[in-house]
Every structure is written in structure tokens, then in C-alpha cells.
Amino acid sequence: MKKITTGIGPILALVALLLVSLKLMSDATENSTRFGELYSLLLLINALGLVTLGGLVGWNLIRLIAQFRARRAGASLTVRMVAMFVILSVTPVLVVYYFSLQFLHRGIDSWFDVRVERALDDALELSRTALESRMRELLKQSQLMATDISAVDAEKLPGALEDTRRLSGAAELSVIGPKGRIIASSNIDPTAIVPASPSDSIMVQLRQSGNYIGLDPIGDTGLHVRVVVTLPEEVPTQELRILQALFPITERMSTLADSVQSTYAKYRELAYLRNPLKISFTLTLSLVLLLSLLAAVWAAFFSARRMVAPLRDLVQGTRAVAEGDYETQLPRSGKNEVGFLVESFNQMTRRLRDARDETRLSQIQLEEQRAYLEAVLSQLSTGVITLDLERRFVTINHAAQQILGANLQSHLGDELESVAESHLHLQPFTDSIAIRLQDAASDENLSEWREQLILFGASGRQVLMCSGAPLPVVDGRDRGYVVVFDDITTLIEAQRSAAWSEVARRLAHEIRNPLTPIQLSAERLRHKYLPKMNKRDAQGLDRLTRTIVQQVEAMKEMVRTFSDYARTPRMVPEPLNINELISDVIELYRGDDAAQPVELQLSELPPVHADPDRLRQILHNLIKNAIEANEDVAAPSVTIETRCVRETSRSYIEVRVRDSGPGFRSDIVDKVFEPYVTTKAKGNGLGLAIVKRIVEEHGGVVWTENHDRRGASVVIQLPVAARGAEMDDTPAAKREAV
Amino acid sequence: MHCSPSADLRPPPARTYKWLVACSLALMAFEPAVCAPVSAEPGFTVRSAEVRLESGVYFLDAKIVFEFSAEAVEAMDNGVTLTVLIDVEVFRQRTLWDKKILSRQSRINVGVHALSKKYVMKKLDTGEIHTYGSVEEMAAVLGNIERLPLFEAAGIDTEDKYAARVRARLDIEALPSPLRPLAYVSQAWRLTSDWYELPLVR
């Protein structure tokens, strides 16, 4: 259907058929004998053809209006082009039509001339006049013949008629009785059997005037003068008889009369058909006009559609590209400018498609690399964090979250400082990185850094080794920073333990071993030479050897104590209530009369995961330390305070042992936890060092505080024990496992 | 065997030409004048018709009233020759539809001889030419059809039943081409009688 309504082939065939049909119809209008019989059929064919063509144009018009209302691509341009084509083609055709009609009507009118018409009337009248004089003579002659014949007997009538006919020159003589009965007849044509009987109108006229005369075209024999007269009857009662005579017109006169007659008849017919002829020509011309108009309108539709089609394709293609469809390829449309445009469009979409494919491939590769990197990072035991230039988290691997003891995936995209707001124990970590990043931003030489940090989080004290560096510059743009850190708590403890063990071993080997021979030698000197010496020398020797022995014993005690410090017995952690442990230890000091009062301020505490023996040692050391610090104080007091601190991501127990002594000296306050640092006359300086070591073994932290007025505090923080297996996942437990 | 139009025994041709009747009705719907009483308008009417068997040949006798419209008479007076057709059809009656066994058409030209001021009637079948002083006289003769031979009696089966029908009409296609479009759309030129149907008994 679309092919028929829009294809050029069927339409051209239809127009050609209509043109041929219109030509034939035009010929038929001009009385062409060849096509005259087909005139009505041709008229019908043309009408149907035009209706069909009109239907096609109407269909195109309706479709175009629908497309225009639906705002289809190219519809508006098609409407404008069709309107322009129609106006350009229809206007001149209408002008030509109008003037053609004018010329046609004037041309047909010019065929007729009043003078010619009058001349023909005159010619016809002249012919009649010429014939009438002859007819009058023939009437007189017929009346004479009637008189003669009326006297003839019935038996002799045929012969008399024959003679009379020959003498008169008539073609036929008939005597007719009532009711048209032929009584006798004589004809110049012997084969003619039945004479031409007079009609009713002749008989009526005969009855009225007694005779009739007129011209009659008789068969193929041409024009005749018919004379009908009544036969005079001698006896009135005799039936009425009439004589009919047919006289031929002379050949010359007949020819002339026929010529005048036919010419006159033809002219009259033509004059009569003048208006129908105008109508017919107008009809034909109108059909031609309609054909031209409809063909022009259809051609306008066809041309506009052909011209707009590539533009419409371009519009649709552009929309498709705008919607992301880069597969669009428009059909070629010749080698004109539009064709060049279409080719350029196709080239553009091809390049866009290639670029998109390359981008997709790059994205896939990037995703693969990213997945690979994430897989590697997730398997690393080292924490890796990347930050952008605004210090927002870009990537955080699993190890980083595990080391920091916080779920940081939800903080991707957040700023560095915001993490510390929800995870307070990370404050030192974020502050340190922030400072380093500021330094890196201000000084290029400080862009790469390395630092050891200590955190006290949910899993206790952690020592982190952090290093940071800017990410590689891509396309001249900085991309951010990467921070890598490791939990080296276990490593440091192991190293420290190994170092102290080595020191203890060396001490035992290098110092303790020689002490025994020294002591034995001094005792031998005493036994061997003391009895032999005089009193004075003996007293000197006794004093010297006793001093040697005592100092050796003191050195042995020192080495033993150090060995105890360096020795790392296996921890046996268990859920422990610190308050109960403190109460047990305090009982030992309350029994002593000289003991100082110990005040307890214990809060409700959750259990901790710790070795009770090691913690008991800590408490002994701290209480002993506090009592010794209060020796010179008038109103000594020792206070032990416990509390539980709960934060978002961690909970810990704090034990504070406070004395009323002078406090730690400022020159050693930073070194009080180092071995052999002491201000006391007695003591080996290992008390607080052991405390620090045990606290760190339990994942805790310890520090000292000097109070403003008097006294100092040693503060211990221990992580609250997690439940079940989680407890074993703490760094302390892990360290024990290691 | 003389029968009026209302004395139709059965209408075999009408059944055959149902589509023609439908088309005619559709055309009549667009021209109310057609629906006016026939007697008030000029036209042709078959008053009576008879089929006679003489000497083994069927002849048709018919009385047809030819009332030419003023336009037709004017055309004749102006030299236009009109052609009158007498259509005769004979059917063999069957159960479902009838079979046409004869279709005969008589053509008669009528016109005016200007020189003699006579109306001329020429039977194209026989070549006979007759002249008349008036249209009415010519029409009266034209409508008096006598002994129009149809077919030989030996050509039909005595066991079957036969029917015939007659009509008269003006042949528009015989008019000069310029007149035809007007004639097709003008009632004055649509001079066609109804079919006059009559049984044919041996």
C-alpha cells in the first residue's frame, strides 16, 4: 500500500493513462468517429482515475497533517516545501486554465456567424420557394389527372393510371379508397409492390382543404413531391377515392436541395450543440487541469518527501546519538550536499562508536586493574589508605580496618578529620597524618615521611609504623596521598624481649658467674688468713672480706632481679575483676602497723582479660612505690581509683594509684619507666619498668601524672575483655599466640 | 398471451439484474426527481405486448407510448438525429436463475428533414424511411410495433417454460459526444421504459 501511495512508478503510469484517456476524450469531443463511441467510457475512466489520484493526494495530505501534529521529524519542513511547490505549480496552471477557457469559449462562438445563419435560412427558403412553384404546377396537373381518372371504369383504372403516370412523369400514381385501401397503383419501379400510402396527417389535411401537397424524402430515391387530391365523383353516393401522385424532383434540383438541406441541418446541429460543446471542452479542460493540479500536488509531495527524507533521517539519527545509540548509520542519499552531510554523520557515529568501545575497553581494563589491586590490597597484612588532595578517603583496605579496629568503609569519601569524631582512639593517627600532609603540602622534601605512632584502641595499645607518600602525578595533576602502616607492637615486644633476655643472659654469664669465685675467694681469704693475723689486721681483713661478700651478694641479688625482669614467663590470661584483685592485694598492706592508709575508690568494672599473677605484681609494685614516695610526708595517703571508660569504638578500664609524695622529678619524669631509673636510695630501678612491661603485654598503656599541689599518680589503662573468641583476637592474645 | 406489466408471473430477468436494480436505486437516491410519478414526466412506456406464433415463428406485437421530452424534440428540431432502441429478451425459466436465450434490439433513427419540415423515421433494421408531419404522429407510428420476428419455434423446448420482456429507450451513446455528459446527468434525456414482462407459451 505504501509503495502504491508513495512510489513513483504507479503514479506515473496512472498519470500517463489519464493523459492518453484525456487525449482520446478530447478527440471524441470533436466528433471523431474513431473514439466517439468510447466517449462515455473515456469520461468514466478519467473520472475514476482522477478520483484515484485525488485519493492518493488526500491520503498523502492526511498523513502529512498527522505527522505534523505528531511533530514528527521533517514534517514541518515537508509542509513548507509542499506548500511552496503547490503554490508555484498551481498558480500558473490556474492562470492558463482561466485564459484557455476564455479563448475556448470565444473560439467556439466565433464559429457561428449570424450572416452565415441567415444565408443558410435564406438558401433553405429559396429552395422551398423554388420547389413550391413546381409543386403548384404539379398540383394543377394532379387535379387534371384526377378529373380524367375519375371517369375511368374500375376495370380500366390500372391501365389508365399507367398511361397517365407515363404522360405526367410521376414516379408513382395510386388510387386509394376508404380506410387506405389501394384500388389501383402504377409505379415507375416495377418491383415496388406496395405504394407509399399517405399518413393520417395528410388525410386530415385532405379532408380539410381537399388536397395535399408536400415534399417527402422517399426511401433511397430522394426527395419527391407528394400530391394527394380527391377524385371528383359523378355520383355523390359513390365512395370517396383519392389520387396520390409522387413526382420526383429533377436530379439537379434534388442535388442542390440535398446540399442545402444537409448543410443547413449540419449548421443547425452545430449551433444547437454550441453550449454542450463548450461544456464538453470545459469538462475536458477541467479534467486536464485537475490532472495537472493533482499530479503537481502529488509531485510536490513526492519531491518534498524525497528531499526531506535524508534530513529526517539525520534528525532521527542525531536524536539517537543524543540518546547514546552510536550504532546509527543513515542510508546514502546521493552525491549532493545532503549526501555529504549524511556521510559525515555516518563517519561521526562510527568514530563515536569506536571511541565508546575504546572507553568501555579502558573501563573494563581499569576495573580489572582495580579489582586486582583491591585483591592484592585485601590480602596485604599492611594497612593501606589513599586520600585525595582534599584529604578524603579514597580507598581503605581490609588490613587497615583490622589494624585500626574500626569499620572505615562507611567513611569512604569523608574527610580524614571526620573519622576521629566517630572513632576517638584514632585521633592520634588522624592528627599525625594531617600534620604530615600539611608538611608535605608546604615542603616538597617532606612529601615522603615515616613515623611510629602509638594508639590505644579497642584492642589495647598498638604501635604503628606509618609511612606516607604522594601518589604519582598523572597528566600533571596531583592525585593525593597513600598512607601505609603496620602494627609492629608484637615485633617491638619480641625485639625488646629478645634484647632483655640477651642482656640477662650476658649479665648472668659475664657478671654472675665471676661473682661466686670472688665470694669463695673472699671467704677462703677469711678462713685462711684471719686466724693467723693479729687482731688489728684481722679486724681489717674481716671488714674487707665481709664487704666483698656482702657486695657480691648484693650484685647477685641485682642480677637475679634483672633476670626476673628480663624473663618472660608465659602469660595465662583469664577473665578477671580488677576490683577484687585490688582488694586482695590491699589486705596484705593493711595488716602492717607501719603501713600507710590506702583509700580505695572503686567503680563497677567489667572483667578484663589478664594474667592475675602479673597484675598482682603490678599492683604490688605501684603500692610499694606509692608508700615509699610518702616516706617523708607528714600525712601520707595512698589512693587507688578504678573506673570504666566507654567510648564509641572502645572500652577500657583505668586504674589510678595516687600518692601524696613530692611527685616525680622533672628531669626523670619522661624516663621513669626505663630500667634503673630511680630517685630512691634503695631499690634497683626496675619497679616501674616491670609495670610498664606487664601493662604493655596486656595491651594497655601506663603513664605518670604529677599533681599541682602534692602527689603523683601512675595511671594504667587496660582494654575491656571482649567475649568469647573475640577476646582471642585482641592484639595481646595474638601476641601471646605468637 | 397479452399481458399487463402487473400480471408478472415471475421475474427471472429482475433476479439476474439485481445488481443493476441496486445501482439504479442508489442513483435514484441522489436524484429525487426520478422518484416522481412517471405519468407527470415525459418518457417511454410499454402499454402492451404480445408474442404470437405464426407459421412456426414467434412475432412480437407491442403498443409503446413515446413521449419525447421537450429537450429531445428541440434537439431533433435542430438537426440532431435520435436513436430509439426496442429491446426484446427471451428467457428460459429455471429453478435458480433463468437463462437468456435471445436478446434482440431494434434501432430506429428519428429526426427532422429541414427542407420538407417533416419528421423522418428510419428503421435501421429494414432501411424503411417514413415521414410525418408531427412528432406525435411519428411517435404513434413508432409505438405501434407489429409482427417483429423474434425466433423460430423449433428452437425452443416444449417442456420448458419461457418468458419475454420488452422495453424502449433512447440511446444516449448514439447522441453527439458533446450532448452525452448532459444526457447522462439530465432526467429529460433519461427516456427509458420499464421492462414489460410477459410469459411465452407455445
Image (cartoon, rainbow, N blue to C red):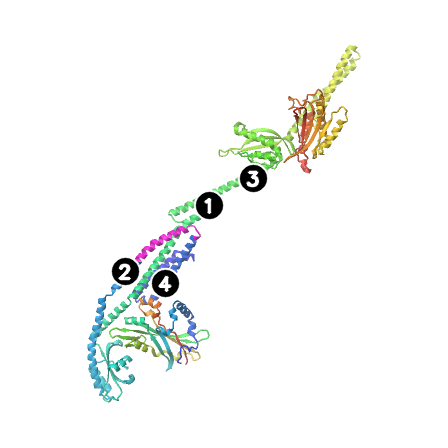
The reply to whether the magenta stretch includes residue A553 is no
- In the rendered view, does B134 fall on the left or right side of B152? left
**Discs 2 and 3 share one subunit:** yes
In magenta, the rendered stretch is A69-96
Mark 4 sits on what residue? Answer: A47
- The image quadrant that residue B175 belongs to is bottom left
Mark 1 or mark 4, which is nearer the start of the sequence?
4
Mark 3 or mark 1, which is nearer the start of the sequence?
1
Q: CA distance from mark 1 to mark 2?
A: 60 Å
Decide: few, some or many residues near mark 4? Use Cα within 10 Å; few <14, some 14-19, many ≥20: some
As drawn, A691 above or below A124: above
Q: Is residue A79 visible?
A: yes
Q: Secondary structure at mark 1?
A: helix
Q: Amino acid at mark 4?
A: Ala
Marks 1, 2: nearer the viewer: 2
Mark 2 sits on what residue? Answer: A103
* Residue found at x 46% / y 75%: B95
Marks 3, 4: nearer the viewer: 4
Mark 3 sits on what residue? Answer: A371
Mark 1 sits on what residue? Answer: A322
Marks 4, 2: nearer the viewer: 2
Q: Amino acid at mark 2?
A: Phe
Decide: few, some or many residues near mark 1? Use Cα within 10 Å; few <14, some 14-19, many ≥20: few
Which of A693 and B112 lies nearest the eye of the viewer?
B112
